Image: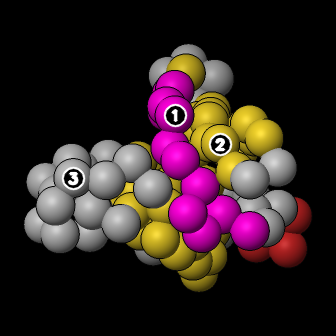
């Protein structure tokens, strides 16, 4: 479960089109990897105030790719990743 996980960092490898999100959960540090990435949005406007904690994660069909992952932070910002990976192959729990 990623609710209340602490976002440690995000790394995007341009040529490889891969994105890695590092988080800390109650079970320890985890690395979430996404391949075949076609879109990334990382706003940090903090409409609900500053926070480094994850609120929710949602996976839906993408506009530009097969999957769209939305990581809503407790700051109110939504990190968006679109990648050509089947939703059934994504493991975000």
Residue 10 on the magenta span: yes
Going by the image, does 93 lie left or right of 57?
right
Whole-number angstrom distance, CA of label 3 to CA of label 1: 14 Å
Query: Alpha-carbon neighbours of circle 2 within 10 Å: few (<14), some, or many (≥20)?
Result: some
Do the residues bearing badges 2 and 1 touch, measured as CB atoms within 8 Å?
Answer: yes
- Tell me: residue 73, above or below residue 88: above
Q: Where in the figure is residue 37, as x and y percent of width and height? A: 57, 44
Q: Is the N terminus in the top left, top right, bottom left or bottom right quadrant?
A: bottom right
Question: Of the numbered discs in the image, which one, if any, rests on residue 24?
Answer: 2
Do the residues bearing badges 3 and 1 touch, measured as CB atoms within 8 Å?
Answer: no
Which sits earlier in the primary sequence, circle 2 or circle 1?
Answer: 1
As drawn, the residue found furthest toward the right would be 89
Q: Is the C terminus in the top left, top right, bottom left or bottom right quadrant?
A: bottom right
**Label 3: which residue?**
50
Query: Alpha-carbon neighbours of circle 1 within 10 Å: few (<14), some, or many (≥20)?
Result: some
**For numbered disc 3, what is the local secondary structure?**
loop
Q: Where in the figure is residue 30, as x and y percent of width and height? A: 75, 40
**Residue that appears at 74% across and 37% down:** 29
Q: Where in the figure is residue 21, as x and y percent of width and height? A: 59, 39
Residue 31 on the magenta span: no
**For numbered disc 1, what is the local secondary structure?**
strand
**Residue that appears at 60% across and 69% down:** 3
**Label 1: which residue?**
8
In the image, the segment drawn in magenta is: 1-12
């Amino acid at each position: 479960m990623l609710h209340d996980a602490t976002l440690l960092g995000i790394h995007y490898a341009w040529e490889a089109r891969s994105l890695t999100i590092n988080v800390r959960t109650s079970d320890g540090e985890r690395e979430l990897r996404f391949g075949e990435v076609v879109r990334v949005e990382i706003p940090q406007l903090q409409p609900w105030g500053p926070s480094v904690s994850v609120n929710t994660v949602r996976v839906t069909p993408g506009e530009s790719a097969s999957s769209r992952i939305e990581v809503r932070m407790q700051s109110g910002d939504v990190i968006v990743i679109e990648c050509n990976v089947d939703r059934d192959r994504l493991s975000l729990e």
